[in-house]
Amino acid sequence: MTDHIPYEITPQEFNHPLYQLNEAIDRLKEEHALLSEGLQEVYAKACEVRRETDLLVLNYKLRTLRFTVLEFRKALVEHSNWEERELFPMAAWYFGNEMEVFTIMEHEHEQALFRIDCFLKMASEKPIPVGHADAMQMASQLLQAYALLKNHFNEEEEILVAFADRSNAFGY
């Protein structure tokens, strides 16, 4: 029986783009999991606002939703900046011209942020107490952002993992 000794990775190999890309994909999955939790919280609170009939409770829920959205937006912007600064350039270097699909995904981030910013702008400009119709309009902005991002997170991971798996199969 043969003893199998684990292969030790040299520092040069550890810095190879393949390992960096795999680490980046792991980070992407972790951040998407956290963002998905935050997104789900935004969605749940937006749905609560849409169901609320009591004007006083509605305005309290809107204020709470606004703080939740501000926190989520901050995390989303940090994540988007990391993707644009590190992940996408690394993936483009690694995969070449096939990365045009990430231009579309960056656009999805922008569209979701636009919807979130519309909600925040409306929340800061509407006179208090906010009426039910205005609250519906505000919440609908967040529901649109939710739909964009829910699909976006899964799609982005699937595409990157598929590219990485394919190139790993070819040994690079």
Image (spheres, rainbow, N blue to C red):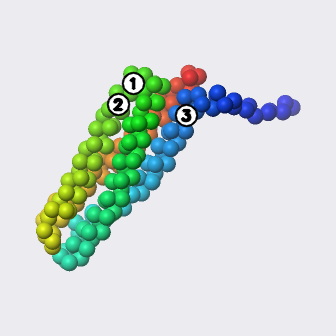
Q: Position of residue 87 (x, y in %)?
A: 45, 36
Mark 2 neighbour class, 10 Å CA radius: few under 14, some 14 to 19, many 20 or more: few
Taking the spot 36% from the left edge, 33% from the top edge, the residue there is 102
- Tell me whether circle 2 and circle 3 mark residues in contact (CB < 8 Å): no
Residue 66 is drawn in which quadrant?
A: bottom left
Element on which disc 3 rests: helix
Q: Which mark is residue 24?
A: none
Q: Residue furthest right?
A: 1
Residue 164 percent coordinates (x, y): 51, 30
**Distance CA(mark 2)–CA(mark 3):** 21 Å
Task: Please state which amino acid type lies under the numbered disc 1.
Answer: Glu
Instruction: Give the label on residue 101, or none.
Output: 2
- Which of the two residues, 170 or 1, is positioned nearer the viewer here? 170
Number of numbered discs on residues: 3
The residue positioned 36% from the left and 61% from the top of the image is 41
Which mark is first along the chain, 1 or 3? 3
| Residue at (39, 27) in percent of width and height | 99
The residue under label 3 is 20
Question: Given this view, does label 2 or label 3 mark the residue nearer the observer?
Answer: 3
- Percent across and percent down for residue 135 are 18, 65
Helix, strand or loop at label 2? It is: helix
Give the quadrant of the C terminus.
top right
Give the residue at mark 1.
Answer: 98
Label 1, label 2: how many angstroms apart (C-alpha)?
Answer: 7 Å
The vertical placement of 81 against 73, above or below, is above
Q: Are marks 1 and 2 in contact (CB under 8 Å)?
A: yes
Q: Is residue 167 left or right of residue 40?
A: right
Residue type at mark 3: give it: Gln
Q: Quadrant of the N terminus?
A: top right
